[in-house]
Amino acid sequence: MEKFKTIKNNVDGILIEKKSKFIANIAYVESVEQAEEFIKSIKKKYYDAKHNVIAYAIETGDGGLAIKYNDDGEPSGTAGSPILKIILEKGLSNVVVVVTRYFGGVLLGTGGLVRAYSGAVINALDNAEFVEKKKGYKLKVVVEYDEADQIKYIVNKYNFKIIKVDYLNNVEFYIEIPEEKIDEFTKNGNNIFSKNLKYDIVEEKYIDI
């Protein structure tokens, strides 16, 4: 997996169809576990709704894609599947969608359900900002104060991202780096510093390109 397209921030959208209210909530996630937790939180929020339909597509890290959808009591093929289809057609990964329906007393038919669930998702995505991400790391690099500018030079040279800097007994940099740039970062650091550059991998994560 080189890179993938996803949403930058969580979004929502609403559609009203023949007195039924469809509320789409879409979140960025990095794992199936996060997706399932988001689904639980939405179901808890809208506990009194008739349906909470879900779908997600998540990178597995080995080139695969974990997908899931559920109609939550709606007729088969009218809810979860159309939502997943939109996610895949738009080339999105690492997103989870929950569309909540408050029934308005009027039956919509299979075609009407597909259009309503799809429309709520599209309305939410109209509010989204899209980004490309790839696998990377969050590093912690600790240097002395007189070495801080050298770290900044390396970061700027390769267009890495400094997330946070803590000025304590030493200077602690938290930096996002693409997976394939770790060796290059270390090599350049060792060339610039009189001693080997040391860092800790705080976490593996997907980073913005």
Image: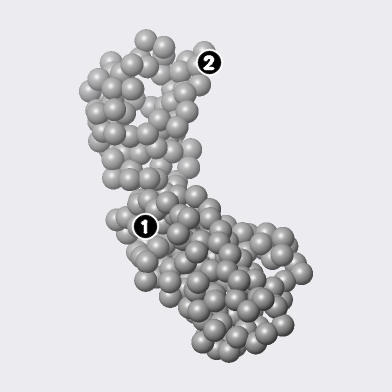
Q: Which residue is mark 1?
A: 5
Q: Which residue is mark 2?
A: 168
Amino acid type at image mark 2: Leu
> Considering only order in the chain, which callout, 2 or 1, is on the residue closer to the N terminus?
1
Mark 1 falls on what kind of element? strand
Name the quarter where the N terminus is drawn: bottom left
Residue nearer the viewer, 139 or 50: 50
Q: Tags 1 and 2 in contact by the CB under 8 Å rule?
A: no
Residue 149 percent coordinates (x, y)? 33, 16
Residue located at (41% from left, 14% from top)? 144
Residue nearer the viewer, 184 or 39: 39
Residue located at (60% from left, 86% from top)? 108
Name the quarter where the C terminus is drawn: top left
Mark seen at residue 101: none
Residue 184 sits above or below residue 195 on the image = below
Is residue 208 at all visible to an observer of this figure?
Answer: yes
Residue located at (72% from left, 60% from top)? 45
